[in-house]
Amino acid sequence: MRKQRTAATRYALEYGGFFIWAFSLVSLLHLRRRYHVVYVHNMPNFLVFAGLLPKITGARIVLDIHDPTVELLACIRGRELSPRLQRTAIGEERISISFADAVITVNESMRQTAERDLPSAGRSGDEPPRSRSLRRPGKIPPGDSRSVARLQRHRRPP
């Protein structure tokens, strides 16, 4: 039991340390050269908050989700997560998705999960979805160029 707790604690400390490093570096680099878009590839999802300073100053945050948090953590631990840890992981995923301006997923089921977790308040029915499923990772399918154009319209002048 002690070893499992130690492993979980170490995992949390490593993620926390990396987050502090990433937050500091992104903030410093943003002050030198204003970013228009901050792209975050998940695990962990909360790395989107490393882009807090750029977001405050007008940059857009894109979260690319490749791994479902709860399932991946269960696989890493070799057993199902406790209900408390499941709620924590789901909450972290929802808050991170809500903070992002756009979400990219690798398949349709991940997109549906992301859409479920996105807040719908303040969105009109004709507004495009904030999440996209890329059928071929690494390539933007035809028609998704609108997402890129939408992000470019929000760019601030240098």
Image: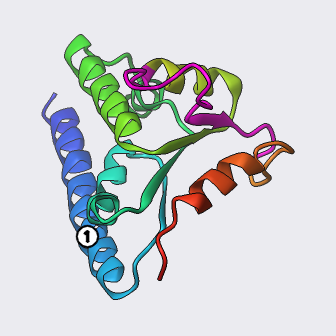
In this image, 111 relative to 124: left or right?
right
Circle 1 crowding by C-alpha within 10 Å: few under 14, some 14–19, many from 20: few
Name the quadrant containing residue 51.
Answer: bottom left
Find residue 133 and report its horizontal and vertical position in percent: 69, 34
- SS state under label 1: helix
- Measured along the vertical axis of the image, is residue 119 above or below residue 60? above
Find residue 101 and report its horizontal and vertical position in percent: 45, 45
Name the quadrant containing residue 97.
Answer: top left
Residue tagged 1: 21
- Measured along the vertical axis of the image, is residue 91 above or below residue 96? above
Find residue 59 and report its horizontal and vertical position in percent: 41, 62
Question: In the rendered view, how is the structure colored?
Answer: rainbow
The front one of 43 and 39 is: 39
Q: At 29% across and 82% down in the image, what residue appears?
A: 31
Q: At 16% across and 27% down in the image, what residue appears?
A: 1
In this image, 130 relative to 77: left or right?
right
For the magenta stretch, what is the residue range? 117-137
Three-letter code, disc 1: Trp
- Measured along the vertical axis of the image, is residue 48 above or below residue 153? above
Q: At 29% across and 53% down in the image, what residue appears?
A: 49
Q: At 43% across and 31% down in the image, what residue appears?
A: 69
Q: Is residue 97 magenta?
A: no
What secondary structure is the magenta-colored segment mainly?
A: loop
